[in-house]
Image (cartoon, grey):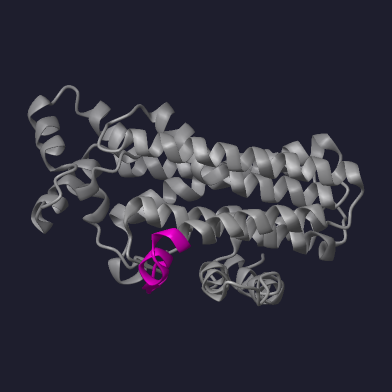
């Protein structure tokens, strides 16, 4: 079985050169520097790796999917630039955020520039015109859905929403770009529409599992490995599957429910209060519930691509889905 983490490192190294090749030395220099900051810093590169692997899994020439992989990575980083602005974050990946280093106007323009460059790259794909249109349709729809998901997230801030609303939000915020990378890679590889849609479903489910597990790490992860306190999400009042399940489970225990709600979203909550909220979630079975759901999403993802012929790329796709809910950060 492929080690997804090690395989990702290998693919990331292979994609590093192409990712760094599309932003030239144009004027103004500060905009070029700002645009390079996030995509050049590295990261897991899960989305571009998925694009290349899905191309190979349908029997395509993986080198033709590399430009699409770069474009998707640029779009992902464009969203990070704007996310950091909206959230007021001052650091990402251990370094100052772009708006801190270059100022808000340049950060906005750097995000816009990455967005534009991504579509320029897709328009130059070495595939038939019909395949290019299909890839563009997947990617452009994903960006539209990302915007919807981001606004839903903003609208949900400080509120307890239903599990259904939360899952739709993370699908739009997280899964759709995974899915555009996967389906787009399959299209570049020559897949028919039915195969591309199945691979799209695989990535949607993988993305959902990834985000649910990410929320789990925010509460149960080792701060020394995740790089953030277990209190962060509790203090921010982040609504997750664990939170919605806890509130539903405590409907028959009003006193404990009130205690939980009094801590959730309390920006100055003490470590002891956060530990209490965490214990309430554990006792309510909400941590296990979230992990069960993450596992269900990953199993659905793997089932969606069961029809693909056996190959190293398919093996990596399966390993990547499992890695989404079996990692430390």
Can residue 325 be seen in the rendering of this structure? no
At 45% from the left and 36% from the top, the residue drawn is: 169
Quadrant occupied by the N terminus: bottom right
Spot occupied by residue 233 in the image (x, y as percentages of width and height)? 27, 50
Could you tell whether 76 is left or right of 223 in the image?
Answer: right
Residue 284: quarter of image? top left
Magenta span: 93-106
Spot occupied by residue 263 in the image (x, y as percentages of width and height)? 13, 43
At 86% from the left and 39% from the top, the residue drawn is: 192
Residue 254: quarter of image? top left
Residue 322: quarter of image? bottom right
Could you tell whether 296 is left or right of 103 in the image?
Answer: right
Could you tell whether 326 is left or right of 60 in the image?
Answer: left
Spot occupied by residue 269 in the image (x, y as percentages of width and height)? 11, 51
* Depth order, front residue of 68/44: 68
Quadrant occupied by the C terminus: bottom left
At 86% from the left and 44% from the top, the residue drawn is: 131
| 98 falls in the magenta region | yes
């Amino acid at each position: 079985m492929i080690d997804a983490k090690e395989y990702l490192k290998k693919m990331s190294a292979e994609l590093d050169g192409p990712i760094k090749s599309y932003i030239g030395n144009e004027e103004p220099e500060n905009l070029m520097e700002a645009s390079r900051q996030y995509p050049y810093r590295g990261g897991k590169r899960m989305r571009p790796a998925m694009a290349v692997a899905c191309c190979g899994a349908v029997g395509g020439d993986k080198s033709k999917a590399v430009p699409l992989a770069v474009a998707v990575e640029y779009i992902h980083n464009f969203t990070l630039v704007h996310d950091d602005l909206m959230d007021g974050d001052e650091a990402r990946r251990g370094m100052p955020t772009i708006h801190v280093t270059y100022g808000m106007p340049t950060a906005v323009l750097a995000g816009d520039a990455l967005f534009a460059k991504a579509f320029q790259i897709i328009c130059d794909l070495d595939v038939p015109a019909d395949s290019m249109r299909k890839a563009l349709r997947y990617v452009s729809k994903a960006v539209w859905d990302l915007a919807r998901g981001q606004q839903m997230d903003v609208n949900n801030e400080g509120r307890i929403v239903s599990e259904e609303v939360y899952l739709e939000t993370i699908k739009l915020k997280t899964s759709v770009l995974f899915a555009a990378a996967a389906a787009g890679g399959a299209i570049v590889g020559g897949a028919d529409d039915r195969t591309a849609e199945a691979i799209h479903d695989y990535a949607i489910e993988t993305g959902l599992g990834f985000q649910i597990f990410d929320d789990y790490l925010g509460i149960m992860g080792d701060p020394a490995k995740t790089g953030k306190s277990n209190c962060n999400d509790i203090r921010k009042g982040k609504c997750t599957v664990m939170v919605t399940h806890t509130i539903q489970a405590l409907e028959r225990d009003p006193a404990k429910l009130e205690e939980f709600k009094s801590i959730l979203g309390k920006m100055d909550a003490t470590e002891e209060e956060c530990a209490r909220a965490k214990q309430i979630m554990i006792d309510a079975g909400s941590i296990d519930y979230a992990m069960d759901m993450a596992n269900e999403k990953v199993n659905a993802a793997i089932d969606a691509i069961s029809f693909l012929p056996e190959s190293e790329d398919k093996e990596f796709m399966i390993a990547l889905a499992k890695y989404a809910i079996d990692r430390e950060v």
